[in-house]
Amino acid sequence: MNEETHDRSGRAVGLVPIDDDNWRAVADVAPRDDQRAFVAALAARYLLLSLRGGVWTSLGITADDRVVGHVMWAYDDEGGAYWIGGMVVDAAEQGRGVAAPAVRALVRELSRRPDCTRICLSYHPDNTVAAGLYERLGFVPTGEREDDELVAELRVSRPV
């Protein structure tokens, strides 16, 4: 088992595009009640942002090929950064170690893009679980805010 790509119970965690077969499962992803101050009540909101906003790209998070969450990414032309947003792990999957390998997988994907020099995300200041996760994964607070959230970034180095 590889901690980089598997959750604590040994399930392979991956990212999948949203398609006709999985969109309902992704839309139904819901966080725990105590997390609704930090993320949408259902991942369906993020799917709609991706479909209607023209900026975000939604992905399903899977554990052994079963949808367990949602995450999305976008590129900010003005700031020259890729952004991670809308990450929700279903309440039934909380505490199983799904989030870290999912973020690592997305960081790997985005880092492969030749124009990727930094990856940003934001989280509510009271969301200490998210803050700890992102810090463990190498994200550093920038001191900036996006609406009412703190911004953190991960610098992507290029081989010389």
Image (cartoon, rainbow, N blue to C red):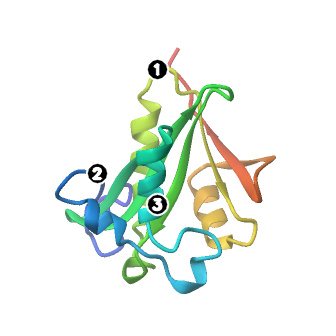
Q: Are marks 2 and 1 in contact (CB under 8 Å)?
A: no
Q: Could you say where residue 59 lies in the image, as x and y percent from the top left?
A: 36, 51
Question: Sequence order check: which comes first, mark 1 or mark 3?
Answer: 3
Q: Quadrant of residue 110?
A: top left
Residue at disc 3, secondary structure: helix
Number of the front mark, 1 or 3: 1
Q: Which residue bears the numbered disc 3? A: 100
Q: Quadrant of residue 77?
A: top right
User: Mark 1, residues whose alpha carbon is within 10 Å: few (<14), some, or many (≥20)?
Assistant: few
Q: Could you say where residue 104 lies in the image, as x and y percent from the top left?
A: 44, 50
Which residue type does callout 3 highlight? Ala
Front-most of residues 18 and 14: 18
Left-right relation of 59 to 99 = left
Which residue type does callout 2 highlight? Ile
Which residue type does callout 1 highlight? Pro
Residue appearing at x 50%, y 82% in the figure:
32
Q: Are marks 1 and 3 in contact (CB under 8 Å)?
A: no
Q: Which residue bears the numbered disc 2? A: 18
Q: Which residue bears the numbered disc 1? A: 114
Number of the front mark, 2 or 1: 2
Question: Sequence order check: which comes first, mark 3 or mark 2?
Answer: 2
Above or below residue 71? Residue 126 is below
Q: In the picture, which quadrant includes the N terminus?
A: bottom left
Front-most of residues 6 and 80: 80
Cα distance between the residues tagged 1 and 3: 24 Å
Cα distance between the residues tagged 3 and 2: 20 Å
Residue 85 numbered tag: none
Furthest toward the right, the residue is: 143
